[in-house]
Image: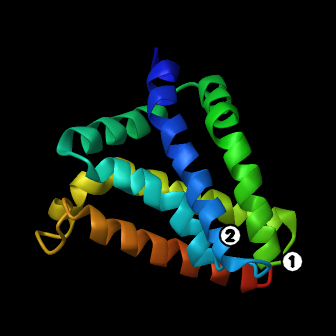
């Protein structure tokens, strides 16, 4: 039942991600995309879906939050089904942007981007209390823009930092 719910939510979002990425690639021609453009294609569709309504935001946040305590087999199946192709395509674009980066570094940093995205979606409603009212957790556009800026900058820094 959870897989069917996830399918109904994730597959249309992934289709939009692929469309945004394709549109960006068409605009860029032969030039590799910036990480900001790549992560904009990754984040914008899910942020737009979440911004549709309070109900949409709540359902998506609950689905993401509920996936964390699930058994490992379920998580692995979910990742293969909904994130496998997505990860491959986005990693290939990141490799074009950073041709000298190892696949290992790309995957590590992409994993951290996905974790930031999922954590933000699952915990966004706590932002108001956490910030003592300074931050508006209902401002989906601000959250989306900050998340894109944050993960792009962090990814770039992670790739450019030497590993021992």
Q: Which x, y percent locates residue 147?
A: 43, 69
**100 or 122, nearer to the observer:** 100
Report the side of 83 relative to 47 (left or right): right
Say which quarter of the image contains residue 141.
bottom left
Q: Residues within 10 Å of mark 1 (few under 14, many from 20)?
A: few
Q: Quadrant of the C terminus?
A: bottom right
Q: In front here: 90 or 66?
A: 90
Q: Residue at x 38, y 73 (%)?
A: 145
Residue 67 percent across, percent down from the top left: 47, 33
Q: Please identify the quarter of the rendering in which residue 37 is found.
A: bottom right
Q: Residue at x 66, y 24 (%)?
A: 73
Number of the label disc, if any, that sits on residue 99: 1
In this rendering, position of residue 161 left or right of residue 151 = right
Q: Name the residue at the top extreme.
A: 1
**Is 15 drawn above or below residue 101 in the view shown?**
above
Give the camera-side residue of 44 and 76.
44
Whether residue 69 appears in this view of the structure is no
- When the figure is inspected, residue 71 is found, relative to residue 58, above or below; the finding is above
User: What's the CA distance linking mark 1 and mark 2?
Assistant: 20 Å
Pointer 2 residue? 26
Q: Helix or strand or loop: what does disc 1 sit on?
A: loop
Q: Position of residue 85 (x, y in %)?
A: 73, 43
């Amino acid at each position: 039942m959870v897989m069917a719910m996830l399918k109904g939510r994730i597959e249309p979002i992934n289709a939009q991600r692929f469309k945004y990425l394709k549109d960006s690639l068409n605009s860029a021609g032969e030039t590799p995309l910036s990480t900001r453009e790549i992560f904009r294609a990754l984040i914008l569709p899910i942020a737009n879906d979440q911004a549709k309504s309070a109900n949409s935001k709540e359902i998506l946040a609950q689905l993401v939050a509920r996936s964390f305590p699930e058994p490992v087999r379920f998580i692995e199946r979910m990742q293969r089904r909904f994130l496998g192709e997505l990860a491959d395509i986005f990693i290939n674009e990141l490799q074009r942007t950073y041709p000298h980066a190892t696949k290992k570094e790309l995957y590590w940093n992409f994993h951290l981007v996905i974790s930031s995205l999922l954590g933000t979606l699952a915990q966004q409603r706590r932002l108001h209390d956490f910030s003592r009212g300074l931050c508006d957790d209902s401002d989906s556009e601000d959250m989306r823009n900050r998340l894109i800026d944050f993960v792009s900058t962090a990814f770039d820094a992670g790739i450019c930092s030497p590993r021992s």
